[in-house]
Image (tube, rainbow, N blue to C red):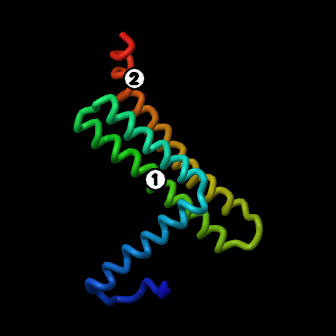
Amino acid sequence: MNMDSRETKFGLFRFLKSFGYAAEGMKSVWATEQNFRIHSFMGVAVFLFAYLLSVSTMEWIILIILVFSVLALETMNTAIEKAVDLSVDEYHPLAKAAKDLASAAVLLFAICTAIVGAIIFLPKLLELIN
């Protein structure tokens, strides 16, 4: 695989190849990252819950954006961790800080997503109970 990002060629074939690289990245993050799989299963559960509770179109849009944003952020966290691992051979406090900060970004967004999910789902669940 040619990893030279300085190529200046354009065209349909190059564009289509980029989807193959993205698919390889998705397979890699799925195979190697437990948290990505957990977030994926939680996303499926959210979508199932949204279907069962008949959320509005706008709520669907919000939930889709949030779930896929968490997955994208988890993927970026993995990329940062791998780049840091590649750049250092032994423990370095700045390498640890970079990895911890990337992980914290995922956690913060996951908390935000859970709060928004609660705002969307709790009133619907309370309606079912009452």
**Residue beneath label 2, please?**
122
Among all residues in the image, which is located at the extreme left?
A: 57
The answer to which quarter of the image holds residue 120 is top left
Q: Which three-letter amino acid code belongs to the residue tagged 2?
A: Leu
Q: Which three-letter amino acid code belongs to the residue tagged 1?
A: Leu
At 34% across and 89% down in the image, what residue appears? 8
Rendered location of residue 10, percent (x, y): 28, 86
**Residue 111 badge:** none
Rendered location of residue 68, percent (x, y): 39, 51
Q: Residues within 10 Å of mark 1 (few under 14, many from 20)?
A: many
Please give left or right for residue 50 compared with residue 85 in the image.
left
Against 74, is 124 above or below? Answer: above
At 48% across and 49% down in the image, what residue appears? 40
Q: Are marks 1 and 2 in contact (CB under 8 Å)?
A: no
The answer to which quarter of the image holds residue 6 is bottom left
Rendered location of residue 19, percent (x, y): 37, 73
Label 2 secondary element = helix
**Residue 71 badge:** 1
